[in-house]
Image (spheres, rainbow, N blue to C red):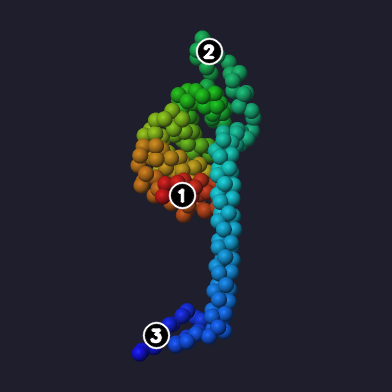
């Protein structure tokens, strides 16, 4: 009769024929040891997963706070309070004197946006970019034009406005481009609203690649996790 040979994993005995009690005890100890190692590995994985989940929650909270405070941050960038433009003298029943100073005009348009008057804000932001194309706030005005459309739910027009800002930054027409990354982000959001998911994902990935360690990159990464 042929003997049956069992080839066990590393650390186990190679045996044939009769098995001794000592061999069985050794195998049992090996099994117990391996089970302990597996349990330790699983515990370590659970800790890592919990840490990742905690980090994800913290990132979400930061993203939500940043989104809610975007307008307030814009306010802080202005030297004077936006309420100052509310007291502009009027010419006739409905005509308002538009400031000649670019900074005051920008504040006037932004103040209108704060009040929810998106059409009025867009009108005066458009006047601003036509009158002051060389201003350092030119890209900001373009961004807020796109934002007025986004707020209204007119995502196609929002994409057009954000595209204009992106193009002006890439061609050098805009001297300052601090709104470039967020314009790309809001363009991606607009495309998502329009159902153009693949195009949006491409833009989000580009943001992560081109603008690492920024708020926009962080938000883009979070959005990609949801889409993929």
Residue at (52%, 49%) from the top-left corner?
A: 218
Residue assigned mark 1: 225
Q: Nearer the viewer, mark 1 or mark 3?
A: 3
Q: State how far apart marks 3 and 2 are (Cα).
A: 106 Å
Helix, strand, or loop for circle 2?
A: strand
Residue 135 in picture, x, y percent from top left: 52, 37
Q: Nearer the viewer, mark 1 or mark 2?
A: 1
Res 10 seen here: yes
Residue 77 in picture, x, y percent from top left: 61, 36
Position of residue 111 relative to residue 37, above or below, is above
Considering depth in this image, is 187 or 220 the residue closer to the camera?
A: 220
**Which numbered disc, 3 or 2, marks the residue that appears first in the sequence?**
3
Res 126 seen here: no
Residue assigned mark 3: 4
Q: Is residue 80 left or right of residue 200?
A: right
Considering depth in this image, is 43 or 5 the residue closer to the camera?
A: 5
Q: Nearer the viewer, mark 3 or mark 2?
A: 3
Considering depth in this image, is 224 or 10 the residue closer to the camera?
A: 10
Residue at (50%, 23%) from the top-left corner?
A: 117
Residue assigned mark 2: 91
**Which numbered disc, 1 or 3, marks the residue that appears first in the sequence?**
3
């Amino acid at each position: 009769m042929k003997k049956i040979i069992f080839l066990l994993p590393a650390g186990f005995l190679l045996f044939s024929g009769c098995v001794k009690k000592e061999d069985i005890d050794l195998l049992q100890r090996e099994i117990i040891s391996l089970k302990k190692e597996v349990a330790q590995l699983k515990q370590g994985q659970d800790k890592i997963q919990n840490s990742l989940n905690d980090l994800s929650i913290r990132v979400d909270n930061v993203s939500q706070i940043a989104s809610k405070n975007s307008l307030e941050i814009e306010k802080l960038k202005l030297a004077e309070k936006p309420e100052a433009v509310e007291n502009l003298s009027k010419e006739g029943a409905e005509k308002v004197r538009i400031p000649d100073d670019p900074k005051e005009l920008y504040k006037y348009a932004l103040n209108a946006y704060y009040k929810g008057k998106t059409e009025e804000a867009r009108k005066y932001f458009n006047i601003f970019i036509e009158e002051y194309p060389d201003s350092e706030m030119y890209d900001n005005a373009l961004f807020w034009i796109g934002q007025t459309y986004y707020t209204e739910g007119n995502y196609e027009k929002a994409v057009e406005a954000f595209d204009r800002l992106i193009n002006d930054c890439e061609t050098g027409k805009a001297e300052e481009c601090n709104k470039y990354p967020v314009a790309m982000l809001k363009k991606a959001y607009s495309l998502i609203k329009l159902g153009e998911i693949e195009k949006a994902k491409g833009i989000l990935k580009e943001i992560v690649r081109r603008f690492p360690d920024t708020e926009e990159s962080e938000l883009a990464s979070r959005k990609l996790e949801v889409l993929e």
